[in-house]
Image (spheres, rainbow, N blue to C red):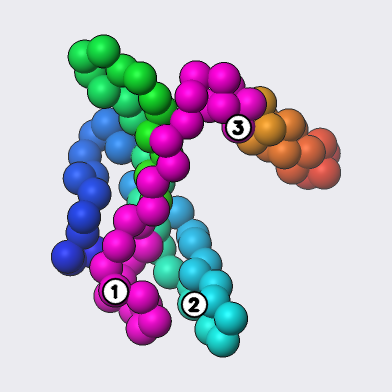
Amino acid sequence: MTDRLMKVNAYTTLDLVDAVARGQEFETEAFAVANATSDKETPDCVRLQFELDNMTEEHLPAHMEELELTADQARTLAADLEKHADRINDADE
């Protein structure tokens, strides 16, 4: 991914995931980076960041999406992710 806005290094949460960009008149599959982070000093939120590989995406300029979550919101999201991950594991058994 050239033109990347996010830093990708050993601390990035997920540096290669499948993603889909959907609009009213398009749908494009791409690789993406997903990262959860907070400030090192005096953190006040959890940032959940996503960036699609813009090398194959034709409809959107290079950009990154970022959610700023409170600690409670981050825990709620984490619990929901765990619940759905468990459903996938249960379906595989």
Numbered marks: total = 3
Range covered by the magenta-colored residues: 51-78
Mark 3, secondary structure of its residue = helix
Q: Distance between the residues labelled 2 and 1?
A: 13 Å
Q: Name the residue under label 1.
A: 61
Q: Are marks 3 and 2 in contact (CB under 8 Å)?
A: no
Q: Nearer the viewer, mark 3 or mark 2?
A: 3
Sequence-wise, the earlier of marks 2 and 1 is 2
Kindly identify the amino acid type of the residue bearing the numbered disc 1. Answer: Pro
Which residue has dot 2 on it? Answer: 28
Return the residue at label 3.
77
Quadrant including the C terminus: top right
Q: What residue type is labelled 3?
A: Leu
Please say if 80 is above or below 24. above
On the rendered structure, is 54 left or right of 9? right
Q: Is there CB contact under 8 Å for labels 2 and 1?
A: no
Residue at screen point 34% across, 30% down: 37
Q: How far apart are marks 3 and 2 (CA)?
A: 25 Å
Q: Residue at x 23, y 45 (%)?
A: 8
Instruction: Determine the image quadrant of residue 27.
Output: bottom right
Q: Specify the quadrant that holds the N terminus.
A: bottom left
Residue ID at (73%, 31%):
83
